[in-house]
Amino acid sequence: MPVSDSPHHRSRQLQQRAERLLPGGVDSPVRAFRAVGGEPPFVERAEGAYLFDADGNRYLDYFGSWGPMILGHAFPAAVEAIQQAAARGASFGASIAAEADLAELVTKCFPSVEKLRFVSSGTEACMSAIRLARGFTGRNFVIKFEGCYHGHSDAMLVKAGSGVATLGIPGSAGVPAETAQHTLALPFNDLEAVQQAFAAYPGAIACVIVEPVVGNAGTIPPAAGYLEELRALTTEHGALLILDEVMTGFRLSLGGAQQLYGIRPDLTTLGKIIGGGLPCGAFGGRADVMDFLAPLGPVYQAGTLSGNPLAMAAGIATLQELMAREDVIYPALEKTTAAIADGVAGIAREAGVALTINRVGSMFTWFFTAGAVTDFASASASDTAAFGQFHRAMMEAGVWLPPSQFEAAFVSTAHGAAEVERTLAAARSAFA
Ligand SMILES: *Cc1c(COP(=O)(O)O)cnc(C)c1O
């Protein structure tokens, strides 16, 4: 086929232009498709469960902007709220009523969040929550888990998941060893490792931060009793428990993983869905801890665009819809996602391909391995070349999966029976 007739011709041109101006042509590494091969389409618009690229191709979307788009793209109430807010002015750098409006919705969904502060990303939320935990406890060490991603702040780029895992970088260049020396990275789902760390660093561990359901090494659920025991150990040793619900918040249930598993953390970090697709994050929790923040307390934290009016408007519209239709939305997401995840796994099995499905609610991963995936080491046993081949075949069939074995796929309320059928048909051709 001559290049000018290529169904990806325009995207290819845009990629070449972008590569001259942006490193790798992207503003976030995993978008470059390096882990799966193939060419990343340039998106022109999106609606419901579908993305439309610059060449007019349509893709069924299974990454939902990496989590935020639980109501599908261009959800009408969110679009209208953003338009109305934009007409009143994009940013003031002064307080607006909408900040407390959204805060009130968040505290209703998350009873453990008594007070919160808005920021502009999940990275900022996690970085700030850790500073607060250190300031509150007067301790330096932080426990995190291998394969968990808590944003790209220096201290958290130790054995991190997501793009860091995808690229096989053990951390990152540019992070001084001194900066990471207080970060203890332990295997997920291994309580003994946590007990040993508390014994090795008595009175020195400020907090444990964890993705309650890991999404950034692919989907990995907590073992039975694991989160409960993390709660008990942190309490016993005077450390704070931070649940990083940037991905799981409002997705696994209205009240996130902490509602699903019945865990009350000291602090929670939020992002993604909370901003309805606009840059927004938040961290919050116990009022006595949150009051350690400036201007009330000694822990400094700030943001020029924090509590941005457009982000607040999009977040309010999104949470209002989730809250109003909670009893319909979450069971429907569960049912649709099960049909997709199990359906494709069945097709793979018939084709003689070994797949392990990990799924919690509307987040899931097809790991190309026969063994159970319970931590980063077992996730890493996956055949990433086979995943890459599957990814390219699904793209060819018009289904856009997250472009890495180590990222969770997401289903939205705009995915219905027709999308299940379309996905299974694409999988049949991919495994043929
Ligand atoms: C996405 C994510 C982050 C980082 O959020 P950004 O908005 O990309 O900075 C942090 N923690 C978890 C669990 C995430 O999934």
Image: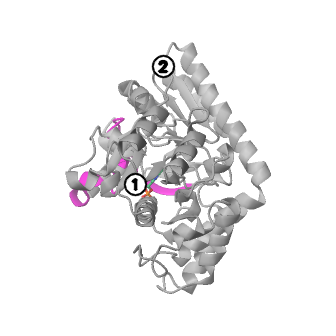
As drawn, the label of residue 151 is 1
Front-lying residue, 258 or 381? 258
Give the x, y percent position of residue 365: 52, 34
Q: Is residue 13 magenta?
A: no
Label 2 sits on what residue type?
Gly
Q: For label 1, count other residues whose C-alpha is less than 10 Å away and answer few (under 14), some (14-19) or many (20+).
A: many
Is 22 displayed left or right of 131 in the figure? left
For residue 225, which quarter of the picture? top right
Give the x, y percent position of residue 27: 33, 57
- Image: 59 above or below 83: above
Whether the residue carrying mark 1 lies under 8 Å from ligand 1 is answered with yes
- Image: 20 above or below 253: below
Which residue: 42% across, 28% down? 387
Give the x, y percent position of residue 376: 41, 33
Residue extent of the magenta highlight: 20-46
Give the x, y percent position of residue 106: 64, 65
Q: What element carries label 2?
A: loop
Which residue: 54% across, 20% down? 348
Q: Quadrant of the N terminus?
A: top left
Q: For label 2, count other residues whose C-alpha is less than 10 Å away and answer few (under 14), some (14-19) or many (20+).
A: some
Label 1 sits on what residue type?
Gly
Badge 1 or badge 2: first in the primary sequence: 1
Q: Is mark 1 on a helix, strand or loop?
A: loop
- Return the residue at label 2: 371
Q: Quadrant of ligand 1?
A: bottom left
Front-lying residue, 223 or 168? 223
